[in-house]
Amino acid sequence: MTTAVHDATHPSAEPMELLRTMLEEQVAVHTARLNQLMVYARLPRHAGYGPRTLDALAAASRQRIAETAQALKRMSEGTYGVCGDCYRPIPLGRLRAAPQATNCALCERRRPETW
């Protein structure tokens, strides 16, 4: 009798397709939000937003689009799901929670805050 060994931390083909779908949906959502903010910026009263708030929201949407696009690029290159610092597999649970993650939770906690 043989026993199959599965790496519970590294995504297999089925979860990888789910993660790809999640990432593609995130790109669509953030692109739609950015388009909406651009329309608001052209309105006389900016749809109730201040210009600085609109700029900050647009910058955040652009950042999320860029992060998500980079995750999709890593998928196509075969490096998705590998921590950029320790080079170990990023656990599937972390990828499900943050599919654009570039680091495992341990390495992410070690990074200095950028705020």
Image: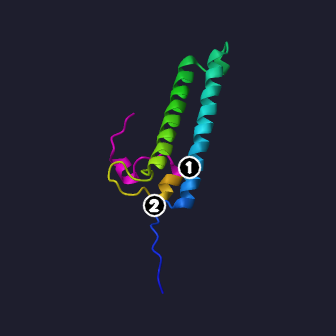
**Which residue is rendered at x = 52% and y = 51% of the image?**
97
**Which residue is rendered at x = 59% and y = 54% of the image?**
18
> Where does residue 16 sit, x and y in percent of width and height?
53, 56
Marks 1 and 2, how far apart in space?
Answer: 14 Å
- Which quadrant would residue 33 be assigned to in this image? top right
Q: Write down the residue under mark 2.
A: 10
The mark that comes first in sequence, 1 or 2, is 2
Q: Main secondary structure of the magenta part?
A: loop
The amino acid at mark 2 is His
> Where does residue 42 sit, x and y in percent of width and height?
64, 15
Looking at this rendering, what residue extends furthest in the front direction?
A: 77
Q: Write down the residue under mark 1.
A: 20
> Where does residue 11 sit, x and y in percent of width and height?
49, 59
The amino acid at mark 1 is Arg
Query: Is the C terminus in the top left, top right, bottom left or bottom right quadrant?
Result: top left
Question: How is the protein colored in the picture?
Answer: rainbow
Front residue (pair 32, 46): 32
**Residue range (magenta):** 97-115
Q: Residue 73, relative to residue 94: is it above or below? A: above
**Which residue is rendered at x = 51% and y = 36% of the image?**
64
Q: Secondary structure at mark 1?
A: helix
Q: Residue 13, relative to residue 74: is it above or below? A: below
- 108 part of magenta stretch: yes
